[in-house]
Image (cartoon, rainbow, N blue to C red):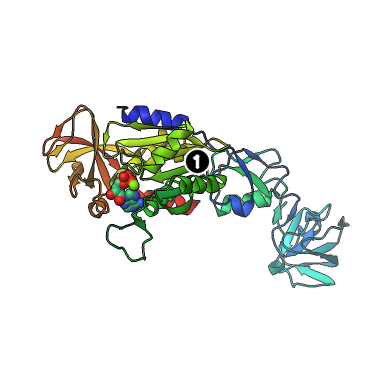
Amino acid sequence: MKTVEEHLAEVLALVAPLPPLDLQLLDAHGHTLLEDVVAPQDLPGFDNSAMDGYAVRLTDVAAAAEGSPVTMPVTGDIAAGSRSAYALGPGFTARIMTGAPMPRHADAVVPVEWTDGGVARVEIRRAPALGEHIRRAGTDVRSGQVVLEHGTVLGPTQIGLLAAIGRDRVLIQPQPRVVVLSTGDELVEPGQPIGMGQVADANSYMLACAAREAGAIVYRAGIVGDDARKLMNVLEDQLIRADLVITTGGVSKGAYDVVKEVLSRLGTVSFDEVAMQPGKPQGFGTIGPDDTPILTLPGNPVSSYVSFEVFARPALRRLAGHADDELRRPLVTGRSTAAMRSPAARRQYVRVRAEKRREGWSATPVGGHGSHLIGSLAQANAFAVIGEHVVEVPTGGNVEIMLLDSARDRQDAARR
Ligand code: AMP
Ligand code: MG
């Protein structure tokens, strides 16, 4: 049998971060930037007025005061968007609007509130300081400056900045696209009547959501019966939209374990026993003309979920561009509130409720060992991980706890 670590290493060797994608700004929203963005020009791009008011030469209005206003002719209006090259002669003012380009020779703006608001002539009641109410070119962003660094997550304000410097597209880290399908003649869609011998397809829904929380775009291909030809057809159809395919069921030693039967023949997918519980039968490899990676997880719901967490999630996170030390769920050490048993030479994942108390983390087993027990799986928020060399953890003993932090995943997803 392979160890969990050996199997994970082989699975990870199959996948590499997806190459950068060039996206339009709204589509880039929420993604991680994969370039340093350099401003091609200054912001503001030109000297402009910060107020609605009057552009002046300082020397003309230096004497203006509340009791002794200065009155000057107004030569015209400069609106935001004005493109005429305007020069201000000595002794003149021009009405200027917020954002309008400053005329040449003007060195301050008198806000309209300091004047009588005149149109042909204006009475100025207060003198501005040199440069007052002018937004100078380049005081926000300098041409050539890196405004957003590689690795930045693009939220609304970052997208706004990209637009402001005139960028319409950027390189981002794409999300991996995952196709999830479940196999089994016994499966029916939730919502349909469940007849004798049938079970509702829980896995493809559970894994679709788990893949989403791992950062993927998910296509749930649904149920495929235990029929070799149908399975091949569905896989061929689905490959076009997959960076990774995940199947469940049909990889054990049963007579109708069609996934194993069909994919073994291809020669590019291998089936192994991994020294873990639950989740012993595992398959992985590549299929199709583009060598699309595929993980074939076991069918029992708990086995499939544990396998997803241990193998598929790290693979998805690698595809999504995460660094090697960010692929796995966080592990903490805590105390077990009950005795836990584990088979020798297998790594056991025990469903637990983990709690952080003042003294530290604790883990309380929920439900039993059976890998079909989805009722208690839904009560667990963590797995206690009992190492290959440990057969028993006594009550109060230390255990490693793998936190299934759904809430944090959902926050990350909301940023995307
Ligand atoms: P298999 O790995 O196909 O032999 O399936 C093992 C067990 O898991 C059987 O009891 C199946 O009925 C059950 N199972 C397989 N796939 C699913 C699924 N998608 N949803 C719920 N249970 C499943
Ligand atoms: Mg089956």
Q: Is residue 84 left or right of residue 180?
A: right
**Quarter residue 256 falls in:** top left
In the image, residue 408 sits, relative to residue 344, either above or below, namely below
Q: Which residue is mark 1?
A: 320
Residue 125 at x, y percent in the picture: 72, 67
What amino acid does circle 1 point to? Ala
Q: Is residue 198 left or right of residue 16?
A: left
Please say whether residue 121 is visible from this viewpoint: yes
Observer-nearest residue: 363 or 138?
363
Q: Is residue 184 left or right of residue 93?
A: left
Quarter of the image that includes the N terminus = top left
Residue 27 at x, y percent in the picture: 60, 52
* Mark 1 element type: loop
In the image, residue 125 sits, relative to residue 21, either above or below, namely below
| Residue at figure coordinates x 83%, y 71% from the top left | 121
**10 Å crowding of disc 1: few (<14), some (14-19), many (20+):** many
Residue 246 at x, y percent in the picture: 43, 44
Observer-nearest residue: 413 or 125?
413
| Residue at figure coordinates x 30%, y 39% from the top left | 279
Observer-nearest residue: 192 or 157?
192
